[in-house]
Amino acid sequence: MQKLFIYVFLCLFFGVKAQTYNYYFGNIHAHSGYSDGNKDSSSNGMNKPADDFAFAKLSQHFDFMGLSEHNHHSSSDLAMTPSRYQMGIQQTNAANSGTFACLYGMEYGVISSGGHIVTYGFNQLIGWEPGNYDVYNAKLDYDTYFRRIAHTPGTFAYLAHPNTGDYPVGTNGIDGSAYNATYDSAIVGVPFRSGPAFSTFTDYSDMDNSDYTPYYNKLLAKGYHLGMGYDHDTHYLTFGRHTTGRLVVLATSLSPANVMDAMLNMRFYGSDDWNTQVNFTVNSKVMGSIVKQNASPQISVSISDADGETAQSIKLYAGTPGTGINPAIMSSVSNNNTLLYTDASLTFGATRYYYLKITQPDGDVIVTSPIWYTYTDQVGIETYNDKAVWNVYPNPVNNVLNIATEFNEAYTLRLLDVSGRTVLEQTETTPGTQLDLASFSKGYYTLQLQKGQALYTKKVFVE
């Protein structure tokens, strides 16, 4: 029964994948009066999610919006409850249309000694206050929270305005702790900028100057797979109108499911400009891809701006995951909307990630999600690590490893030890299955899922 549920959910959620994407501009970090948003409701009468979506739909260059309500009720203006959360979901579903996508989620956590996590895809309120949650999670237990998200297919965590020491797991924040594969499965991104959170402007002129790229670089260097977004963190009736900054997603069409799919697959970027389209590929694979191929990586960039702007500079950054060394500029061009570069220095078996920082003549900046690329001598197999396609849990594991996929046709699972030797192999035909790893030695393993010519990989640690 559980396997059937996973299969039906994933089929409905993900639908059919395609290779041609459109660009949609929006924001997934905002608040209604159901938590601590709509602070000006006494003067305009707008307070509910339905009111906010109606306002947002009329904003310029704004195709989607997510309301991420604070998950707790610790004061009069943080009033989230399980019943309100369900009311918000209902109003969001009713507000959806073919021309504007509406999403509803939560912002979990606290600022003091903690950190905020924007979360979508989890349709029950997670909290810690007595009697004020559907699912309990201790206030500062971020380890359990990340594991909960990683173990729930179709759900993601997005780190809101992250700072050094945030999201404590043990004695340090995740930026000061060792890479964790389970956290990596949960987290899809961080914002390039966040805010201005308490702006009351509605003329698109209040630009934010925060920059979370250093935090982004630190997690990338540790080995995390995460993209670069853009947040508004809206608290007043300004949805989409106080700034021209946008989160840009690449999706096949405009719907909540397709926006979610773009976020889960890291097909998004952060942009100060509200209509610039960035086409960034490595060997024809789009941003967010994690791919292994038998060829040198060929980077292609083309930029389209409806206002006719030519980029002042395009900088291609490259780094090696797991080294702890921040990425560096590998190539750049000036006064051009295209960049072509072949990384001939990448050797067999080596992996690099690449992302772009684009600066426009008016000072607007765009930062993209990366593409991770491994140069392999395997022929005919393309390897991906698709957060939307499958989940494995728990990780670390000491007995049974659960696997949830979107496949109901034959696929092969292989477990490889650190030397690359296959130590387990089996074929499955159902979306959900289990692997008994109780007899395996402690250490890191590579779990592969192969379906046809596609090969998906995850790191697994056996305790």
Image (cartoon, rainbow, N blue to C red):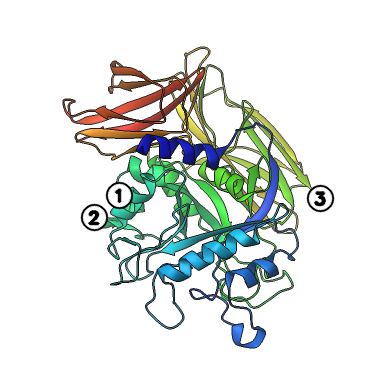
Q: Amino acid at mark 2?
A: Gly
Vertical placement of 401 versus 142: above or below? above
Q: Are marks 2 and 1 in contact (CB under 8 Å)?
A: yes
Residue under label 3: 306
Taking depth in this image into account, of 94 and 435 the one nearest to the observer is 94
Secondary structure under the numbered disc 2 in the rendered image: loop
Residue under label 2: 170
Q: Amino acid at mark 3?
A: Ala
On-image quarter of the N terminus: top left
Q: What is the residue that sits farthest to the right in this orientation?
A: 308
Q: Position of residue 268 (x, y in %)?
A: 59, 46
Q: Earlier in the sequence, mark 2 or mark 1?
A: 2
Secondary structure under the numbered disc 1 in the rendered image: loop
Mark 3, Cα crowd under 10 Å, few <14 / some 14-19 / many 20+, is few
Left or right position of 310 against 375: right
Left or right position of 310 against 87: right
Left or right position of 122 against 94: left
Residue in the picture at 63% in, 42% down: 315
Q: Earlier in the sequence, mark 3 or mark 2?
A: 2
Mark 2, Cα crowd under 10 Å, few <14 / some 14-19 / many 20+, is few
Residue under label 1: 177
Taking depth in this image into account, of 142 and 329 the one nearest to the observer is 142
Vertical placement of 440 versus 34: above or below? above
Q: Amino acid at mark 1?
A: Ser
Taking depth in this image into account, of 34 and 367 the one nearest to the observer is 34
Disc tally is 3
Q: Position of residue 214 (x, y in %)?
A: 47, 53
Foreground label between 2 and 1 = 2
Left or right position of 74 against 252: left
